[in-house]
Image (cartoon, rainbow, N blue to C red):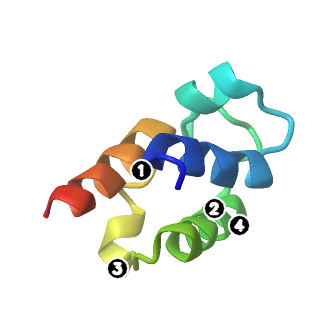
Amino acid sequence: MADTETRLRRCFAAVFPDLDEAQIAEASLGSIAAWDSVATITLLSLVEEEFGVSFEPEDLARQTSFAKILADLEARDTA
């Protein structure tokens, strides 16, 4: 099974197909023009499906970058 970062990159690539690998790693709500509320819901839905996790409504405001989502997923693995 692919590692967490690789799997998350695939989720980002599905939602933001114009981004290359480097752009995905640096992706954030402020740096990607196409990252709007619809993209957020689509991305987090894919992440939930891929990783078998659930985001609570209060979690959504924190999920504003590739790095933050990755950190959240990695924290869940160790919890």
| Residue 51 in picture, x, y percent from top left | 48, 68
Secondary element at image label 2: helix
**Which of labels 1 and 3 is toward the front?**
1
Q: Position of residue 23 (x, y in %)?
A: 67, 24
Q: Position of residue 35 (x, y in %)?
A: 68, 48
Query: Which residue is at 86% across, 35% downward?
Result: 18
Q: Is residue 5 left or right of residue 57?
A: right
Specify which label sits upstream in the sequence, 1 or 3.
3
Q: Are marks 2 and 1 in contact (CB under 8 Å)?
A: yes
Residue 72 in the figure: left or right of residue 7: left
Q: Quadrant of residue 17?
A: top right
- Could you give the CA–CA distance between mark 4 and mark 1, rounded to whole angstroms? 17 Å
Is 25 situated left or right of 4 in this image?
A: right
**Relative to 61, is 17 above or below?**
above
Q: Measure how far apart labels 1 and 3 are at the Cα level.
A: 13 Å
Which mark sits nearer the N-terminus, 3 or 4? 4
Q: Residue at x 74, y 45 (%)?
A: 13
Question: What amino acid type is highlighted by mark number 3?
Answer: Glu
Q: Disc 2 and disc 1: Cα gap in Å?
A: 10 Å
Give the residue drawn at x 51%, y 73%: 48
Check the image and name the residue furthest to the right: 18
Can you tell which of label 4 and label 1 is closer to the viewer?
A: 1
Identify which amino acid the numbered label 1 is placed on: Ile
- Mark 2 and mark 4 in contact? Answer it, CB < 8 Å: no
**Disc 2 marks which residue?**
43
Amino acid tagged 4: Val
Q: Dots 1 and 3: beta carbons under 8 Å?
A: no
Please give the residue where the numbered disc 3 appears in the rendered image. Answer: 56
Q: Which residue is mark 1?
A: 69
Helix, strand or loop at disc 4? helix
**3, 79: nearer the viewer:** 3
Identify the mark at residue 38; answer none if there is no mark: 4
